[in-house]
Amino acid sequence: MLTIDRVGSGRALVSDDLFAQLTARIARDHPELAPDLPARILDQALAFLAACATATEPLGPSDLVDIGWHAFILYTREYADFCQRIAGRFIHHQPEPTPDDPPSGPEPIGAPISRTVAAITAAGFALDHELWGGSAADCSSKCSQCHAGCTDSPTR
């Protein structure tokens, strides 16, 4: 497991080649994004995952940051290696059930943006406030569930 010591940017957690590959994937899959956004999204997705590595409560990405998480998961081998290196375990992507899904247990509780933002900054990463909803990142009542209702699934 990687000890994170004030890394500063999520980008520093992967090789330049992997960062470029994932950024290109985001840009290709989301042509509506401004040219500077794919790299910013991926940086924050990596910082989010690093925060998830030590979280004891579920954390959830913003809509934009979730794009980076989804892109990384597609590269299963690299994603699994990354998770093992930074967390010592696989960081599962847990979508919230849709209304058509049969109940499988207690109703999931959303992860407030404020909890996620606090975990990322506590882990020593720079926060791109615009990607976390600007001032909404300070609102503890705002549920951070991404467009697909995603959270991590901490086991600690």
Image (spheres, helix red, strand yellow):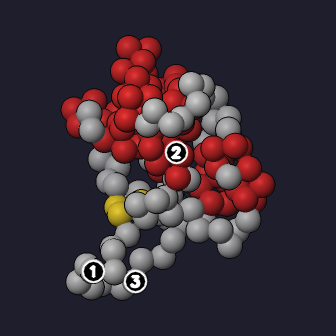
Does any portion of residue 156 appear in the rendered image? no
Label 3's element? loop
Identify the mark at residue 65; answer none if there is no mark.
2
Task: Name above or below for residue 41 compared with residue 156.
Answer: above
Which class describes the residues within 10 Å of circle 3: few (<14), some (14-19), or many (20+)?
few
- Determine whether, in the image, residue 133 is placed left or right of residue 12: right
**Tag 1, which secondary structure?**
loop
Q: Is 100 placed left or right of 141 in the picture?
A: left
> Percent x, y for residue 132?
64, 49
Q: Amino acid at mark 3?
A: Glu
**Amino acid under label 2?**
Val
Q: Which badge, 1 or 2, is on the more N-terminal residue?
A: 2
Q: Is residue 132 left or right of residue 60?
A: right
Q: Which residue is mark 1?
A: 100
Sequence-earlier tag: 3 or 1: 1
Residue at image coords 63%, 36%: 125
